[in-house]
Image (cartoon, rainbow, N blue to C red):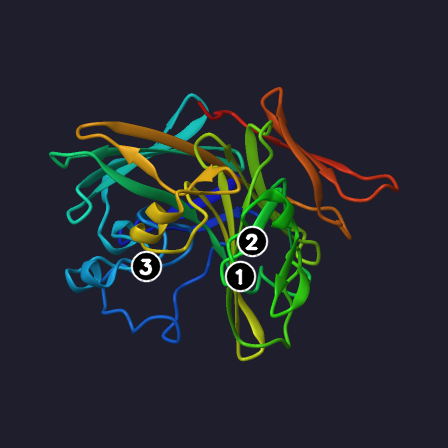
């Protein structure tokens, strides 16, 4: 069984761990070196938060009128609508918020069964007109779960580093997990201490035939894995944020969403798409759009090498270990799946 904690201030999923395992992968909190100190009681970026109505910076004019980085969703207080109750073998709850500048209403339903959580979000445009927007999930892992031993795996395919030129075709794109950073080829599966301080963000798409996207982070020394699964029709992009501070790994974002371009809307409109994937969506006035994902945690056997394949079959997530010499298989029971 798992324990889940969601903050009403900002709506972040700030704890998701097994009840018999003390380690919480989602314990990340924004620090003063990234943002100014947060006033007491005010929402701030932490854990797994929601980026809405944008991913990344506003324009200068929008910023002057109060639009924050990554949008309002993690900066407002969410209202608890239904407190957690047990129903049909699940623990269910719901919450929501309003984004006054974006003109959005957000409803979120949570269903926890064993060690897997289904999150279903509904976004309604309450503006008198339609508009473009973006919707990105921002799970952030941090030490002690994030360590030199922690490995990130995904079924993502081609992508690019945000600081590099946008690839004009698939031939010029990087291929997961490799990306070129500062003229060096970097394997994004691992992120270790003793490197240069700073940030980098890489974005990837999935194969045209892939219907389910997934990303996992596993710490074999701690014996724990956290993973996410979603429909690529909901979230066609995987965005990997890495942050090193004072020579130590400080955070990794396992982000998935509707865009893979970390720019204000005018740049997105000019670019339109990258690697055949759109950089924004449109929501009409009065329209409600629903997206969902599953997040799960599981214990690992000793010396686990990472995830080669993940699939959903027969009400369980099946995980195949990397390596050709007797790879092990894990399974996580799922009582409530994506729909």
Q: How far is the residue under mark 2 from the one under mark 3?
A: 19 Å
- Which mark sits nearer the N-terminus, 1 or 3? 3
Q: Is residue 245 above or below residue 107?
A: below
- Determine which of the numbered discs, if any, sits on residue 112 in the image: none
Look at discs 1 and 3 and give the one toward the viewer: 1
Disc 3 is placed on an element classified as: loop
State the residue in front, 291 or 44: 291
Q: How far is the residue under mark 2 from the one under mark 1?
A: 7 Å
Which quadrant of the rendered structure holds the C terminus? top left
**Residue 269, horizontal then vertical, whole percent:** 33, 46
Does the rendering let one see residue 111? no
Q: For mark 3, does the 10 Å Cα neighbourhood hold few (<14), some (14 to 19), or many (20 or more) residues?
A: some
- CB atoms at circles 2 and 3 under 8 Å apart? no
- Which mark sits nearer the N-terminus, 2 or 3? 3
Toward the left, the furthest residue is 128
- Determine which of the numbered discs, if any, sits on residue 57 in the image: 3
222 left or right of 115? Answer: right
Q: Residue at 58% of width from left, 61% of height from top?
A: 146
Q: How far is the residue under mark 1 from the one under mark 3?
A: 18 Å
User: Disc 1 marks which residue?
Assistant: 164
């Amino acid at each position: 069984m798992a324990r889940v904690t969601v903050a009403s201030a900002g709506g972040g999923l700030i704890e998701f761990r097994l009840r018999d395992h003390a380690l919480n992968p989602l314990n990340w909190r924004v620090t003063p070196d990234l943002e100014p100190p947060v006033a007491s009681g005010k929402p701030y970026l932490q854990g797994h938060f929601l980026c809405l109505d944008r991913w990344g910076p506003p324009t200068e004019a929008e910023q002057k009128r109060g639009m924050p980085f990554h949008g309002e969703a993690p900066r407002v207080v969410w209202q608890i609508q239904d407190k957690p109750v047990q129903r049909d073998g699940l623990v269910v709850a719901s919450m929501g918020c309003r984004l006054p500048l974006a003109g959005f209403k957000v409803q979120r339903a949570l269903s926890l069964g064993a060690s897997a959580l289904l999150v279903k979000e509904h976004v309604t445009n309450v503006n008198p007109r339609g508009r473009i927007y973006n919707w990105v999930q921002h799970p952030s892992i941090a030490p002690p779960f994030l360590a030199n031993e922690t490995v990130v795996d995904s079924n993502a395919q081609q992508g690019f580093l945000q600081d590099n030129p946008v690839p004009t075709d698939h031939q010029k794109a990087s291929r997961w997990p490799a990306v070129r950073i500062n003229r060096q080829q970097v394997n994004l599966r691992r992120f270790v201490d003793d490197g240069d301080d700073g940030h980098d963000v890489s974005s990837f798409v999935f194969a045209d035939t892939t219907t389910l996207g997934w990303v996992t982070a596993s710490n074999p020394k701690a014996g724990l894995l956290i993973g996410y699964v979603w429909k690529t029709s909901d979230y066609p992009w995987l965005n990997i944020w890495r942050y090193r501070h004072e020579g130590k790994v400080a955070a990794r974002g396992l982000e998935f969403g509707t865009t893979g371009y970390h720019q204000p809307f005018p740049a997105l409109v000019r670019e339109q798409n990258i690697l055949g994937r759109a950089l924004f969506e449109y929501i009409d006035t009065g329209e409600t759009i629903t997206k969902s994902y599953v997040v799960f945690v599981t214990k690992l056997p000793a010396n686990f090498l990472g995830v080669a394949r993940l699939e959903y079959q027969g009400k369980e997530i099946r995980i195949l270990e990397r390596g050709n010499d007797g790879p092990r298989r894990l399974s996580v029971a799922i009582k409530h799946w994506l729909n």
